[in-house]
Image (spheres, rainbow, N blue to C red):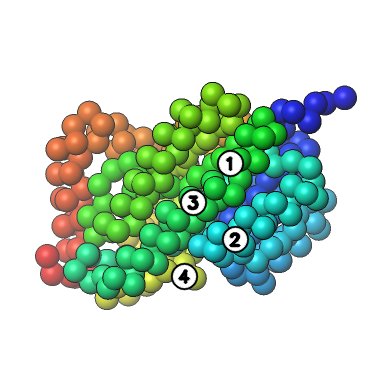
Amino acid sequence: MESNKKIRIFDGAVAIVTGAASGIGRALAEELAKRGCEVIVADLQIALAEKAASKILASGGRAKAVKVDVTDFPALEQLVRATVKRTGRLDYIFNNAGIVIGGGVDLYGIEDWNKVIDVNIRGVINGIQAAYQIMLDQGFGHIVNTASMAGLIPGPGNTVYTMTKHGVVGLSISLRGEAALMGVRVSVICPGVIRTPILEGGGRYGKMLMDIPPEEMRRLFERLRPMPPHIFARKVLNAVAKNKAIIIFPRWWRAFWWINRVSPALGIFLTQRSFQHNLKKLGLEV
C-alpha cells in the first residue's frame, strides 16, 4: 500500500489552484484532474469556477469549486484547512491568481499599485502562509507559484506588474532553498505569452490605463505567438513532476532570460527599444 507520507505525482493527489476559473488556472486544474488529482477550483468568479469544476466532473475527474479571495488570508487559510481535514493531505498548491493593470507609472494611482500588489504578491504570500506549515507537518508538498517572464526581464510600460512578478520569482527561489531541507518542493512558473483573458485588456479584475483599442492589443500579442493554455498546462505539469525550479514556456522565451542574465544592460536596452517600437505601432506618443 502506498505511503501517505510522500507526495503523489499526480494520481491520487490533492491540489488547490487559485485563479482557476479561467486562463492558465483553469487549464492547470483540468490537466491536473486528467492526471488523477482531486482539484479545488478556487476563484472569486464562482460561477465560472463551478462551470470549470462541472466540466472536470463530467469527464470523470474529481473537482470542487470554492469561492475565495486570495487577498483575504483567513478565507484562504480556511480553504486549505478544510481541504486537508476532508482529504487528509495537500500535495500541491498552485498560487496562480494574478491581475494586470497595464500602463506607464505616470498613469497609476496609489489604488492601482495597491490592487496589483495585493493580488500578485500578497495573494501568493497568503497561499504560502496557509499551506506551508501543513506541508512541513505532513513531510511533503509542492508549492507552485505563477510569476511571468516579466519576473525575469525588464518590463517598461508594465513596470508595476513586472515588479510584482520579480517579487514572486525571488520569493519562490529563496523559499525553495529553505523548503527542500524539510521535504517540501517549490517551483515558479514564468509564462511567456499564453492565450488567456489577460490578452483582452487585463482580464476580469485588471484594466488597461493606456488608450489602446482591444483589437490593437490583440494584434500586438498575436505577433508573439500565444501558446494555447491547455498545451501550456501539459508542459508545465511535466516540469512540476520533475521538480524544476523555474518553469518557462513557450520554450523560446528562455532566450530573453538568457540575454538578461548574461548582460543586464543589453536586456534593458532591448526591452526599451521594443517598448518604443510598440508605442509607435500603437500610434502613441513616446
Residue placed at 79% from the left, 42% from the top?
Answer: 88
Q: Which residue is mark 1?
A: 132
Q: Name which of mark 4 and mark 2 comes first in the sequence.
A: 2
- Residue at 49% across, 56% down: 123
Camera-nearest label, 4 or 1: 1
Q: Dot 3: few (<14), some (14–19), or many (≥20) neighbours within 10 Å?
A: many
Amino acid of disc 4 = Tyr
- Could you tell me how far apart the alpha carbons at marks 2 and 3 are, in whole angstroms? 14 Å
Q: Which tag, 2 or 3, sits closer to the chain's start? A: 2
User: Is residue 156 toward the left or the right of residue 44 in the image?
Assistant: left
In which image quadrant can residue 18 be found? bottom right
Q: Which residue is mark 4?
A: 205
Residue 105 shown left or right of residue 34 in the figure: left
Mark nearer the N terminus (1 vs 2): 2
Q: Are marks 4 and 2 in contact (CB under 8 Å)?
A: no
Relative to the observer, which residue lies in front, 118 or 265? 118
Q: Nearer the viewer, mark 4 or mark 2?
A: 2
Q: Secondary structure at mark 2?
A: helix
Indicate which disc, 3 or 1, sits on the residue closer to the N terminus.
3
- The answer to whether residue 234 of the structure is visible from this angle is no
Marks 3,1: beta carbons within 8 A: no
> Circle 1 sits in a helix, a strand or a loop, which is it?
helix
Asked if residue 261 is positioned above or below residue 131 in the image, the reply reads above
- Pointers 2 and 3 in contact (C-beta within 8 Å): no
Circle 4 — which element?
A: loop
Question: Distance between the Cα atoms at labels 3 and 1?
Answer: 12 Å
Q: CA distance from mark 4 to mark 1?
A: 27 Å
Count every numbered label the image shows and give the total.
4
Examine the rendered structure and indicate whether residue 113 appears above or below residue 80.
Answer: below
Q: Are marks 4 and 1 in contact (CB under 8 Å)?
A: no
Residue assigned mark 2 = 74
